[in-house]
């Protein structure tokens, strides 16, 4: 068997010979997992990689462009614990050649969690091997606030996802709630709040997520004074004071 067909292209109702299939070597690797557990578990070491350009190969003193260049490492990941460093070039995993980042993904994915993988790397022009204990690929984080949550003051807040964290230049370790929408003419709008601001604290209290930010804002409104929020905007922190009339007063 070469592969298992998963989709075909029949523009006129009949096959024209174009289809998509899962390769048999992939099926061979995942079939035992499906039989035993009913789902697939992928290996994970926690690195971000990139292709090696000709210019990078020259700077890194590489003889060719083969390999996966480590551009980032997730904190407390298997790679971090094993001593993998940014700038390392992975050329093989368990003897399996790595010519590009996709090869690294395939090699690591096929290693069962809690088992060891041995990447062959080039660091500072010298070849060496590192032993990494592979973990299970984490499940994608579910966003419990997919719809913006009204927080008062004319603000609609959403979760600070990893993608938004990168886009909004929010440092790792800084939590908060993202301003998804500002109602025109609202107290938040008049105070200069804009979509994309990340509320990191309300008053002197740090907030970690939408729920905490909403609760803190509502509490400040009940107390009837201006709300002081600390926001992250364009990678910089700033305080914004939002004038709020107490509930029931014009």
Image (cartoon, rainbow, N blue to C red):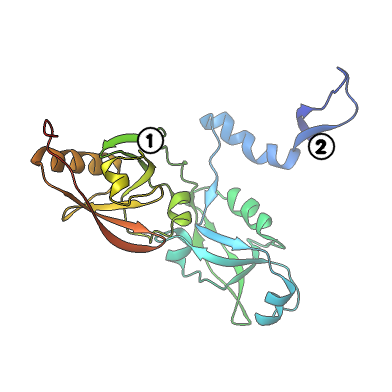
Image position, residue 173 (x, y; %): 33, 59
Q: Quadrant of residue 50?
A: bottom right
Residue 41 in the image: above or below residue 98: above
Q: Residue at x 31, y 63 (%)?
A: 237
Q: Secondary structure at mark 1?
A: loop
Q: Residue at x 29, y 61 (%)?
A: 238
Marks 1 and 2, the one that precedes in the sequence: 2
Of 21 and 34, the residue lying toward us? 21
Which residue was labeled with disc 2?
2
Q: Residue at x 31, y 53 (%)?
A: 175
Farthest residue to the top: give it: 13
Q: Quadrant of residue 143?
A: top left
Farthest residue to the right: give it: 16
Mark 2 crowd level (few <14, some 14–19, many ≥20, 10 Å Cα): few
On screen, residue 193 versus residue 94, left or right, reads left
Of 224 and 121, the residue lying toward us? 224
Image position, residue 157 (x, y; %): 34, 40
On screen, residue 80 versus residue 108, left or right, reads left
Q: Quadrant of residue 24?
A: top right
Q: Which mark is residue 148?
A: 1
Quadrant location, the N terminus: top right
Q: Nearer the viewer, mark 1 or mark 2?
A: 1
Image position, residue 101 (x, y; %): 65, 59
Image position, residue 211 (x, y; %): 26, 39
Q: Secondary structure at mark 2?
A: loop
């Amino acid at each position: 068997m070469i592969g298992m067909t998963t989709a075909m292209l029949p523009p006129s109702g009949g096959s024209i010979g174009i289809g998509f299939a899962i390769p048999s070597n992939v099926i061979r690797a995942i079939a035992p997992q499906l039989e035993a557990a009913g789902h697939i578990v992928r290996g994970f070491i926690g690195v971000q990689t990139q292709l090696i350009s000709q210019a990078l190969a020259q700077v890194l003193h590489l003889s060719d462009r083969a390999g996966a260049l480590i551009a980032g490492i997730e904190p407390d990941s298997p790679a971090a614990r094993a001593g993998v460093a940014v700038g390392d070039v992975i050329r093989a995993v368990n003897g399996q050649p790595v010519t590009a980042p996709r090869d690294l993904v395939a090699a690591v994915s096929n290693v069962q969690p809690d088992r060891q993988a041995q990447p062959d790397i080039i660091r500072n022009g010298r070849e060496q091997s590192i032993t990494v204990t592979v973990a299970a690929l984490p499940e994608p984080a579910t966003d419990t606030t997919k719809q913006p949550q009204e927080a008062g003051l004319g603000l609609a807040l959403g979760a600070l996802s990893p993608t938004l964290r990168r886009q909004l230049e929010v440092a790792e370790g800084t939590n908060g709630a993202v301003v998804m929408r500002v109602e025109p003419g609202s107290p938040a709008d008049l105070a200069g709040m804009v979509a994309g601001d990340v509320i990191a604290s309300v008053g002197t209290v740090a907030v970690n997520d939408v729920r905490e930010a909403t609760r803190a804002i509502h509490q400040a409104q009940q107390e009837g004074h201006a709300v002081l929020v600390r926001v992250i905007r364009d990678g910089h922190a700033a305080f914004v004071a939002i004038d709020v009339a107490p509930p029931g007063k014009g």
